[in-house]
Image (tube, grey):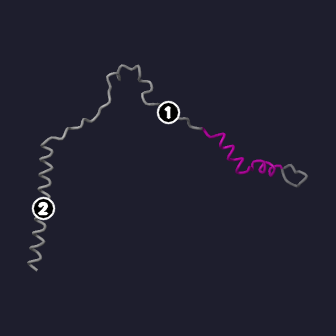
Amino acid sequence: MLQCRDGETGSQQDEDSKMMTLDQWKSMEETKRVKTEFNIRKAGEGCSGDPQWKKMYALTKKEKPETEADEDDEDLQVQLLCLCFLLLVVDLHCTKLSK
């Protein structure tokens, strides 16, 4: 073992040289880290000349005009609700009378 003037041995100096601060370690790790790069594509990119897509078109939902059948269905629903309400009122009235 080599001895220095300070009284330290050569192996202790090697250990001290291996020591580093947190900031030094972070900067060293940052240089080692591989940064990911994303290849972001735009809509329709690369398909403008492709004959496979020339016949494509956007689909839209067609709205149906309201017919008389729809109005009749609504009338039936209203009548059914009125009938249910009437039955409920009669039932409540009967339960009060029976008490």
Is 24 magenta? The answer is: yes
1 or 2: tag closer to the N-terminus: 1
Closer mark to the observer between disc 1 and disc 2: 2
Q: SS of the residue at dot 1?
A: loop
Q: SS of the residue at dot 2?
A: helix
Is 14 magenta? The answer is: yes
Closer to the camera in the image, 62 or 66: 66
- On residue 75, the disc is none
Residue 53 percent across, percent down from the top left: 35, 23
Vertical comparison of 77 with 42: above or below? below
Closer to the camera in the image, 68 or 84: 68
Position of the C terminus, as image quadrant, is bottom left
Residue at the right extreme, as displayed: 5
Closer to the camera in the image, 79 or 21: 79
Q: Name the residue: 65% across, 42% down.
A: 30
Q: Report crowding for label 1: few under 14, some 14 to 19, many 20 or more residues within 10 A (C-alpha).
A: few
Residue 19 percent across, percent down from the top left: 75, 50
Closer to the camera in the image, 28 or 9: 28
Residue type, mark 1 in image:
Ile
- On residue 40, the disc is 1
Magenta residues, as a range? 10-34
Residue beneath label 2, please? Answer: 84
Looking at the magenta stretch, what is its main secondary structure?
Answer: helix
* Image side of residue 60 versus residue 25, left or right: left
Residue type, mark 2 in image:
Cys
* Image side of residue 47 versus residue 72, left or right: right
* Image side of residue 99 versus residue 28, left or right: left
